[in-house]
């Protein structure tokens, strides 16, 4: 199959209509959102959704998020509750996904047989225009090959899915760069299943009790049931071995400078550290305090690390709270919990 890449804006109506028609006819279309690029299919069409799993090589027990163009369209696919609308008034459209009891119309292929469905209303104007033009809810996981970092540009999608899907809509770089915050509602409480740009602190404005699922920070025990199937999978792993350095206990610059002398390694450093390191295979993540920029760069840099063909990658251990929690969650899984230094590490 030939994969076409089309540059789009919310005003390129012809291309958006063409993409909408492709989706309605059961084809797959990759499209930008404010989090990462999504690989979309008609959420009412089981065969189309099966094709998502084939194209990505995604395990069939990992359910898809269904995208709507207005928060109220959740009614077409799920049973909502007052807290959903309180969340919607504050965070939608935006990078928040809410798990709700599903309605019959959503086929089990979308939800991996669960009786709940993940609902999200993206804020990206191209994504919303596409959903509107297709006139259907769009099931869409991240548009990467399974096991690769999520794509934050159309190039990333092309590298992973060229030849497997007919159309990629190129809307430029994603605003946030990590996938949406996924939450579930239980007895009036919110449980964060996957951290994203809507932080637990922000959610506390709407709901008194916000818990963070244990698997967000820790490895799931072998006997433990995943609240969200995605928690089971070792996402985002670069080919090289990634190590996180707890810089509260280890001098990052001295440590990585030594490694640069003896190992074929890449170093994900802060901009401020660049002048103090050997000028080779550096992957600057941004300024130390600029968590938003570090979040936006995360998956791009993990992809670059693969392209450098190094044996090891060293990076700072991110903080595990606030805006940093989303980075922490991805990095701790990408490094298979290999941490060097005191906090929860090897050394
Ligand atoms: P992706 O769209 O690739 O970022 O992955 C979607 C994430 O949402 C995965 O981690 C899924 O496990 C999670 N998810 C989707 N539907 C559900 C659901 N019904 N219950 C719990 N988690 C879900
Ligand atoms: Mg994904």
Image (cartoon, grey):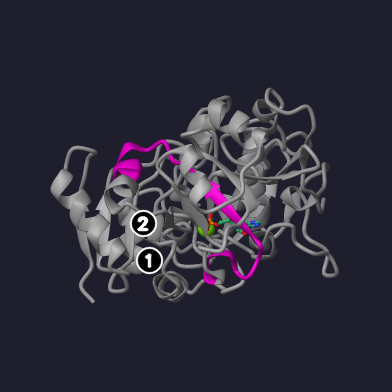
Q: Mark 2 = which residue?
A: 156
Q: Looking at mark 2, is its residue's CB closer than 8 Å to ligand 2?
A: no
Magenta stretch?
109-129
Query: Could you say which is closer to the camera, residue 181 or residue 82?
Result: 82
Q: Residue furthest left?
A: 14
**Contact, mark 2 vs mark 1 (Cβ under 8 Å):** yes
* Image: 21 above or below 122: below
Residue 90: % across, % down:
56, 26
Residue positioned 67% across, 38% down in the render? 325
Q: Is residue 341 left or right of residue 25?
A: right
Residue 121: % across, % down:
47, 41
Near mark 2 (Cα within 10 A), the count class, few <14, some 14-19 or many ≥20, is many
Residue 79: % across, % down:
61, 49
Q: Looking at mark 1, is its residue's CB closer than 8 Å to ligand 2?
A: no
Q: Mark 1 = which residue?
A: 160
Q: Is residue 209 left or right of residue 9?
A: right
Residue positioned 30% across, 63% down in the render? 24
Image mark for residue 23: none
Residue positioned 78% across, 39% down in the render? 211
The reply to whether residue 133 is in sight is yes
Q: Is 122 within the magenta?
A: yes
Near mark 1 (Cα within 10 A), the count class, few <14, some 14-19 or many ≥20, is some
Query: Could you say which is closer to the camera, residue 177 or residue 290?
Result: 177
């Amino acid at each position: 199959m030939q994969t076409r890449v089309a540059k789009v804006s919310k005003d390129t109506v012809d291309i958006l209509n063409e993409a909408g028609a492709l989706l309605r006819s059961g084809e797959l279309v990759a499209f930008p959102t404010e989090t990462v690029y999504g690989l979309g299919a008609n959420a009412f069409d089981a065969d189309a959704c099966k094709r998502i799993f084939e194209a990505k090589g995604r395990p069939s027990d990992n359910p898809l998020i269904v995208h709507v163009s207005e928060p109220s369209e959740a009614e077409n696919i799920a049973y909502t509750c007052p807290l959903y609308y309180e969340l919607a008034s504050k965070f939608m459209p935006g990078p928040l996904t809410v798990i709700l009891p599903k309605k019959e119309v959503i086929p089990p292929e979308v939800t991996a047989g669960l009786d709940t469905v993940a609902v999200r209303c993206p804020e990206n104007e191209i994504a919303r225009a596409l959903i509107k033009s297709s006139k259907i809810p769009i099931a869409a996981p991240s548009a990467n090959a399974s096991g690769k970092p999520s794509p934050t540009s159309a190039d990333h999608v092309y590298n992973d899915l060229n030849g497997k899907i007919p159309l990629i809509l190129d809307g430029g770089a994603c605003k946030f760069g990590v996938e949406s915050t996924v939450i579930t509602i239980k007895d009036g409480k919110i449980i964060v299943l996957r951290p994203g740009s809507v932080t637990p602190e922000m959610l506390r404005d709407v709901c008194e009790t916000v818990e963070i699922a244990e698997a967000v920070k820790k490895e799931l025990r072998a006997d433990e049931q995943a609240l969200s199937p995605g928690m089971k999978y070792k996402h985002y792993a670069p080919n090289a071995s990634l190590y996180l350095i707890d810089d509260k206990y280890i001098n990052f610059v001295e440590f990585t400078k030594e490694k640069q002398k003896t190992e074929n390694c890449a170093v994900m450093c802060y901009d401020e550290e660049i002048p103090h390191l050997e000028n080779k295979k550096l992957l600057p993540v941004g300024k130390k305090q600029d968590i938003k920029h570090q979040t936006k760069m995360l998956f791009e840099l993990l992809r670059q690390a693969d392209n450098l063909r190094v044996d090891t990658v060293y990076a700072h251990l991110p903080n595990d709270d606030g805006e940093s929690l989303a980075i922490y969650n991805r990095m701790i899984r990408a490094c298979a919990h290999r941490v060097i230094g005191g906090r929860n590490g090897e050394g």
